[in-house]
Amino acid sequence: FCQTLLQTVFPPELRFATVKFFNRLFNCFSSYCYFDITEIDGVNTNELYNAVQLYLSSSVSITGNRLSLTRALNSSGFTFGLANNDSIVDTFNGVNVLWEHVVTQRQAQNFSWRPLPDEKRGFTLRIMKKDKSLILYSYLDYIMEKANEIRRKNQERLLYTNSRGGSLDSRGHPWESVPFKHPSTFDTLAMDPERKKEIMEDLQDFANGQSFYQKTGRAWKRGYLLYGPPGTGKSSMIAAMANHLGYDIYDLELTEVHNNSELRKLLMKTSSKSIIVIEDIDCSINLTNRKKNSNNTSSRNYYDPAAELRGACGGSGCGEEGGNSITLSGLLNFTDGLWSCCGSERIFVFTTNHIEKLDPALLRSGRMDMHIFMNYCSFSALKILLRNYLGYEEGDLEVSVMKELEQVIDKARMTPADISEVLIKSRRFKEKAVKELLETLKLAAERNPKNGLLRRTNGEVDDEEEEQEKRALESPKEESEIEDSCSKGDEEGEEEEEEKIK
Ligand SMILES: Nc1ncnc2c1ncn2[C@@H]1O[C@H](COP(=O)(O)OP(=O)(O)OP(=O)(O)O)[C@@H](O)[C@H]1O
Ligand SMILES: [Mg+2]
């Protein structure tokens, strides 16, 4: 009504001045201040608009009356957003703010270098004047950070490999990638729940630890060494880590890397928020015996300080034994030398079946921050497998059966992979599956040489048994034994190497 009255009574100039005056008056007395975040800022897209949109998608509940739904290209999830001209209250550091999504029709364009959308979209943020200085900048920073996180989570993650052997693709990248869709999560991973919780917390602390790493002057990276017999879930653990943090995986095939500088290039081309994996580090390349001076020029895998010096004094390879080998020192530089911190927020994971074969330099503290022993299936891990494969929750199975399983599981020394095989075979007949499992476990326990019950019917042991026997004797029992097994293993390893050199 006021507007119609103004339009009829006052000339346009006076009308404009009056509106301006009332606006000013209103602003003086209002206890709020407003910030407009338009979708297009001049000709550029406003990053903040996109960030706010994503951020609000995480706080808008799915039960809202009207929400806009989007799914971006390559995205693995849907995004909810505020519908046109809707508003929502958000709280930050105990302060309430109001967001309004404002959509208006844009006037017809006569000519433009860049065609603009028909609608003019923007967010208006309303904050109490008294809170403005308190929260505005930190709130906007927080929104940008959250939006990045959501963007990453929605995006399809990638598994990179360097299997092309040093050659670059058309864009100069040494890594090849495929979508990473491994279903393993910490929920499906069968291991001691306490240990699992510890690892998950460690990962979370790492991911949230930017300021800590900055404060302590450490490069923002962390190393995990996963070791244990085959089939105990080392690779599954890596997939679970990636799924948990939403990181990409770089699966580094060391045998495809020809020298240290190639290794460095590969590292430089990895993105932050990623897990760099070297599987079976003891097999992929011979990295032991770093300090030994090998005269055998054909053994390309030994680090030779003298050779490094020779290289530095005139050789072409400078520390790389003529430029065609990868050394332990190169690998160590890769993981914790100066090169490791180009980029940030990276996790290195090495896996091995034989920790005792690794060079102590790889194991010393500060290199691999956490040594995780993936053991044969324990009773608590078995319960997780029973839940995952057969849907048995705690208490679903008879107490006597559980008791029997508990008694036999440690003696059987079976890996979660072996147990999964038994369960998967008869998963449609749950009771049968449990019965079969119990029988298999009992049989394995009887055959286990550690239990002193191994009976050889014809006086011979088949290859598989022999291998298992060897494995059982070689594998350290508990995490606390890491140090012991390392030092013992190292000595053994060195003796072996000495013999080889001779
Ligand atoms: N702890 C576990 N929890 C759940 N499933 C497991 C676990 N360990 C093994 N499995 C099952 O066994 C299969 C093989 O496991 P995985 O590849 O993770 O073993 P690994 O320790 O990496 O073996 P290797 O040393 O031979 O590489 C997995 O696909 C998974 O289904
Ligand atoms: Mg594996």
Image: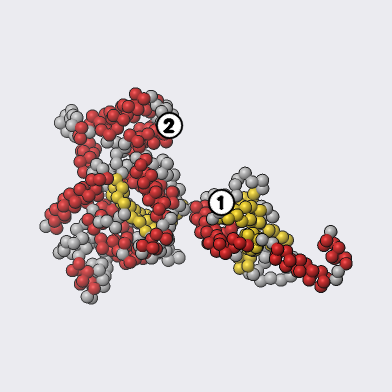
Residue that appears at 39% across and 36% down: 384
Up the image or down, 319 lies above or below 400; here it is below
Q: Earlier in the sequence, mark 1 or mark 2?
A: 1
Crowd class of label 2 (few under 14; some 14 to 19; many from 20; radius 10 Å): few
Q: Which residue is mark 2?
A: 393
Residue that appears at 22% across and 31% down: 447
Q: Give residue 98's quadrant in the image.
A: bottom right
Residue that appears at 15% across and 31% down: 459
Left or right: residue 470 versus residue 33 is left
Rendered image: mark on residue 162: none
Q: Which residue is mark 1?
A: 58
Quarter of the image with the N terminus is bottom right
Question: For disc 2, does the CB lie below 8 Å from ligand 1?
Answer: no
Q: Amino acid at mark 2?
A: Glu
Q: Amino acid at mark 1?
A: Ser
Left or right: residue 441 versus residue 66 is left
Q: Position of residue 370 (x, y in %)?
A: 31, 51
